[in-house]
Image (spheres, rainbow, N blue to C red):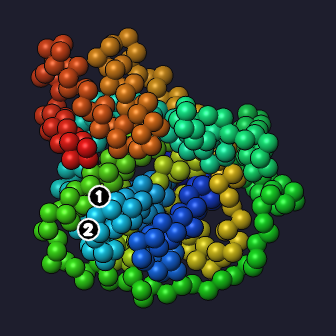
């Protein structure tokens, strides 16, 4: 096992990888609660979606761990499940079964693009400074999510965002967890992020902030209400509305995953030069999970940026992903225990991980204005638009423009020009 996952080459151990896997799972476990809630509003059976969410996460995480040796968790994407329910089903009036068909077709197209190595090629031709910007921008985005989940910041009609209620017990718990975790990390405690979550959970239960679990073992809901529904409306795949849906699923998932891979590979020290080893296998695992998820009955899967929490805890190999898959498998049976892990418990991990990832921006060549502007826009627009894909798209639009202004058109890869046009068309469609 040590040889297969390259423990020695990546300076890790069984204990370190296990703690990392558990940390990542706890950071992304909310998807087991949130995804069924969101998709049930489209008319889907909540119990079936819960099981589909867990099973697709198990398969996706196993695939990326075993095929690509990456410490990443895969599960249904939060942004795309909202798009599925509120934009496609409710907004466009498309039945959820047809929307699942769109997820299925976009997943198959993903697999084709991955096998042809088109996705891998696009990721590898991204300029190095933009890769640092993507990694750093995701760090700010992750920290923003953590601050929001903790209640430290909240929405404000006058200023868009402002300080939250710091007297709130859950927010105080998150602040306590943040301080404890920082102390663990500064003192060099391996797995400090995981231990911080454990301490926060115990303190939350003792002070009545977190409810005690109502039970330990629960029954697994049936997949029957959603299984195979994606095949019912395959004949509608060429309708204009569904084609637009497929394109959006394809676009957002592609660049969310690309951004996550770049950020995670950089954080874990896996990136070599300007290329990500085994990127094609990682992308194939991600796209295969989307197809499987659609068949089971859930929206598009994606590589979770919360995986960075596990990497900060020491995860360096695919064994971390195997542990994540194992945790999701156990969660199928132990849902009552899982329910006590609240956003306030995981929020400190996201804030700290965001800070760690943001250090990547120090590698950007800040003396070159043609680099600075696209990089800055990429970074700042991720948290402000609440979308990794949008930040990447805006940066990719600006980069060719700045290079053309300097008469460096030949230094820009042709694919970057193709993406420039694609993103402009995409934003025109969104508008």
Looking at the picture, how far across and down is residue 124, in whole percent?
27, 39
The residue closer to the viewer here, 157 or 210, is 157
Tell me the tag on residue 249: 1
Left or right of 100 on screen, residue 65: right
The residue closer to the viewer here, 120 or 225, is 225
- Please report the residue visible at 57 percent of the width from the left and 84 percent of the height from the top: 220
Number of residues whose C-alpha sits closer than 10 Å to that of mark 1, classed few (under 14), some (14–19) or many (20 or more): many
In the image, residue 164 sits, relative to residue 59, either above or below, namely above
Looking at the picture, how far across and down is residue 131, in whole percent?
36, 33
> Is residue 10 at least partly visible in the picture?
yes
Q: Earlier in the sequence, mark 2 or mark 1?
A: 2
- Please report the residue visible at 75 percent of the width from the left and 79 percent of the height from the top: 215
Q: Secondary structure at mark 1?
A: helix
Marks 2 and 1 in Cβ contact (< 8 Å): yes
- Please report the residue visible at 18 percent of the width from the left and 13 percent of the height from the top: 406
In the image, residue 379 sits, relative to residue 228, either above or below, namely above
Image quadrant assignment for residue 253: bottom left
Whole-angstrom CA distance, mark 2 to mark 1, is 8 Å
Residue tagged 2: 102
Tell me the tag on residue 13: none
The residue closer to the viewer here, 259 or 265, is 259
Looking at the picture, how far across and down is residue 99, in whole percent?
29, 70
The quarter of the image holding the C terminus is top left
Q: Secondary structure at mark 2?
A: helix
- Please report the residue visible at 77 percent of the width from the left and 61 percent of the height from the top: 210
């Amino acid at each position: 096992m040590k040889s297969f996952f390259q423990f020695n080459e990546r300076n890790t151990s069984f204990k370190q990888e296990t703690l990392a896997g558990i940390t990542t799972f706890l950071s992304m476990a909310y998807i087991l609660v949130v995804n069924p809630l969101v998709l049930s509003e489209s008319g889907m059976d909540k119990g079936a979606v819960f099981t589909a969410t867990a099973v697709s996460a198990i398969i996706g995480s196993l695939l990326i761990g075993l095929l690509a040796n990456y410490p990443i968790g895969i599960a249904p994407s939060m942004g795309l499940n909202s798009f599925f329910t509120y934009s496609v089903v409710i907004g466009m009036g498309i039945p959820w079964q047809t929307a699942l068909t769109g997820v299925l077709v976009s997943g198959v197209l993903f697999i084709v693009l991955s096998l042809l190595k088109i996705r891998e090629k696009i990721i590898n031709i991204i300029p190095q400074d933009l890769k640092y910007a993507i990694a750093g921008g995701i760090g700010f985005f992750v920290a923003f999510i953590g601050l929001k989940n903790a209640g430290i910041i909240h929405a404000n009609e006058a200023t868009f965002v402002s300080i939250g209620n710091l007297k709130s017990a859950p927010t105080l718990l998150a602040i306590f967890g943040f301080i404890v975790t920082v102390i663990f990390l500064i003192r060099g405690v391996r797995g400090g992020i995981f231990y911080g979550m454990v301490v926060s959970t115990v303190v939350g239960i003792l002070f009545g902030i977190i409810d005690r679990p109502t039970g330990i073992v629960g029954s697994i809901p049936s997949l029957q209400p959603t299984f195979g529904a994606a095949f019912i409306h395959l004949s509608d795949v060429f309708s204009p509305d569904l084609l637009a849906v497929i394109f959006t699923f394809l676009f957002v998932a592609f660049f969310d995953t690309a951004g996550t891979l770049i950020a995670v590979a950089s954080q874990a020290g896996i990136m070599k030069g300007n290329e990500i080893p085994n990127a094609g296998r990682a992308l194939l695992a991600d796209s295969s999970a989307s197809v499987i998820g659609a068949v089971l009955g859930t929206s598009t899967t994606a590589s979770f940026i919360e995986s960075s929490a596990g990497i900060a805890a020491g995860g360096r190999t695919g064994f971390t992903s195997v542990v994540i898959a194992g945790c999701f498998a156990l969660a199928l049976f132990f849902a009552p225990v899982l329910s006590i892990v609240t956003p306030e418990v995981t929020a400190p991990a996201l804030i700290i991980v965001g800070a760690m990832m943001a250090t990547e921006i120090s590698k950007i060549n800040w003396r070159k204005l043609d680099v600075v502007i696209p990089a800055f826009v990429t970074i700042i627009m991720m948290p402000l638009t609440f979308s990794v894909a949008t930040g990447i798209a805006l940066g990719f639009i600006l980069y060719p423009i700045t290079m053309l202004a300097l008469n460096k058109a030949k230094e820009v890869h042709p694919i970057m020009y193709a993406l420039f046009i694609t993103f402009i068309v995409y934003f025109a469609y969104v508008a």
